[in-house]
Amino acid sequence: MAALYCALARLYIARRRFAESLDAAKRAASLSREVEVISLLADAEMVRGTALLWLDAPDEGVKTLEEAVVLAEDSGALDALGTALLLLHLVYMVRGEFDRSREHAERGAAIAKKTGDTDLLSMHTANLGLLHFYLGDWQEAQRYLELAVKLERSTQLSFFSSQPHTYLGMLYKARGAWEDASRCFSEAVALARSMPYPYAEARLSCEYGMLHLREKELERARERLRAALEIFRRLGAKKDAEQTSRALQELGRAQEQ
């Protein structure tokens, strides 16, 4: 039952039903403690921490994820450990705590190499590239991101498959390399559709739309943004839908001028 509730909590995360994921993860953690299976408890706490991040409880989410890391290390739950480190890397990066962010990404990459998890290794490598991008070392960022894309292409499709392409596209866009950026976004959209992963497809359609907007290709920008807005509304991603709607309104005003 503990394992089933863990699986259910993960499924709710993928469906962006975070409150339900939190409830399932709490139940999984409680059952795991009853049967004293620490590896399952680590997995449950990793998912609970993830749900808390999405439910705007970042401090509690980080605390839970750090505790999940300790539990996972003690029990050898390497899958939960790698995912928790992945999430903590992103949180610390967003907070501007770049040293802690790098530490978690490097630990995660080392674990992924040890377990042979190419998919997770690709994601940790991409995150290191994104970190270097934010720090202004774009040459090093490109090296990491190109390696991440190469790793991703060598393994099966997963929840993370589109991310390395997205980050590399962001770097190319920042450099003004429009054709390279367009190629990356076109690949990550194809990957998202093939799984399917509609939220990633919508986010990438937004990136594509903003790229067209920057190139003054207003009708193509409108097409991409409208496609993204339709998916966001269907999924119930309210914040994303609001941002995309504002971008379309600004595009309309730009055309009127």
Image (cartoon, helix red, strand yellow):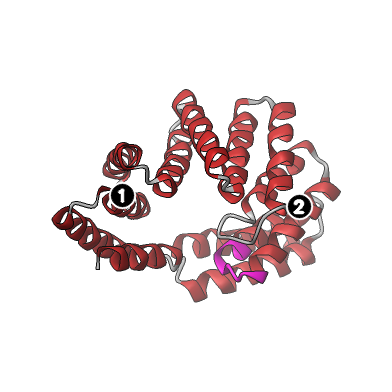
Q: Residues within 10 Å of mark 1 (few under 14, many from 20)?
A: many
Measuring 29% from the left and 66% from the top, which residue is drawn there? 5
The residue nearer to you, when weighing 138 against 122, is 122
Q: Is residue 199 magenta?
A: yes
Q: For mark 2, give the secondary structure.
A: helix
Q: Which numbered disc covers residue 198? A: none
Q: Position of residue 163 (x, y in %)?
A: 62, 51
Q: Would residue 83 be found to the left or right of residue 178 on screen?
A: left
- Vertically, is 178 above or below 7? above
Q: Residue furthest left?
A: 34
Q: Magenta region's main secondary structure? A: helix
Q: Which numbered disc covers residue 184? A: 2
Is mark 1 in CB contact (under 8 Å) with mark 2? no
Q: CA distance from mark 1 to mark 2?
A: 37 Å
**What amino acid is labelled 1 in the image?**
Ser
* Range of residues picked out in magenta: 194-202
For residue 218, which quarter of the picture?
Answer: bottom right
Q: Position of residue 178 (x, y in %)?
A: 82, 47
- The residue to which callout 1 is attached is 39
The residue nearer to you, when weighing 13 against 54, is 13
